[in-house]
């Protein structure tokens, strides 16, 4: 029985992996072993990066809300507490969009939060 090499299968597997490593610097995009190691690490960081992105966006929304609340005489914590007590269930992302796109509506939301906290409404 003739000896069968893994020529075609191996070449196809290597080509598929090197195609994913296209654009990597130096041997990382050309050499199979380096490309394989780099892709394994890249896959791990890709997962971590998606988590960090969510965290960063939430921080951005909170900063925007804090600035908008300060302009209306509230601290961020007071705004959130007032929203919870008044039964307004908007998340931070949508509140931040409202604060930017429709300041008049955000004024009304802030006024309701102040009323729920028994603070003087200006």
Image (cartoon, rainbow, N blue to C red):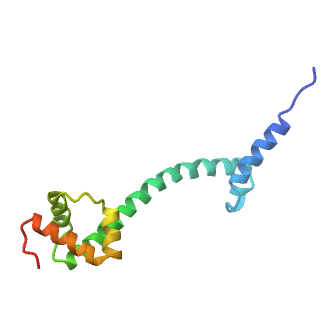
Image side of residue 122 versus residue 1, left or right: left
Closest to the observer, 99 or 8: 99
Residue at position x 79%, y 43% from top?
12
Residue at position x 15%, y 77% from top?
73
**Count of numbered circles in the view:** 0
Residue at position x 57%, y 52% from top?
42
Please provide percent x and percent y for residue 90. 28, 60
User: The C terminus lies in which quarter of the figure?
Assistant: bottom left
Specify the quadrant of the image occupied by residue 6. Answer: top right
User: The N terminus lies in which quarter of the figure?
Assistant: top right
Specify the quadrant of the image occupied by residue 80. Answer: bottom left
Residue 100 visible in the current orientation: yes
Image side of residue 74 versus residue 44, left or right: left
- The residue most toward the right is 2
Please provide percent x and percent y for residue 61. 33, 66
Please provide percent x and percent y for residue 74. 16, 73
Specify the quadrant of the image occupied by residue 81. Answer: bottom left
Image side of residue 47 versus residue 122, left or right: right
Please provide percent x and percent y for residue 71. 21, 79
Closest to the observer, 8 or 78: 78
Image side of residue 105 versus residue 12, left or right: left
* Residue 44, above or below 112: above
């Amino acid at each position: 029985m003739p000896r069968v090499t893994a020529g075609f299968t191996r070449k196809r597997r290597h080509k598929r992996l090197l195609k994913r490593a296209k654009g990597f610097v130096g041997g990382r995009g050309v050499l199979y072993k380096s490309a394989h190691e780099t892709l394994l690490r890249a896959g791990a960081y890709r997962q971590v990066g998606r988590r960090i992105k969510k965290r960063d966006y939430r921080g951005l929304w909170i900063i925007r809300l804090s600035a908008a609340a300060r302009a209306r005489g509230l601290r961020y914590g007071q705004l959130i507490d007032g929203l919870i007590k008044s039964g307004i269930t908007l998340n931070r992302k949508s509140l931040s969009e409202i604060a930017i796109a429709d300041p008049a509506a955000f004024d009304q939301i802030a006024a309701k939060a102040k009323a729920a906290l028994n603070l003087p409404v200006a």
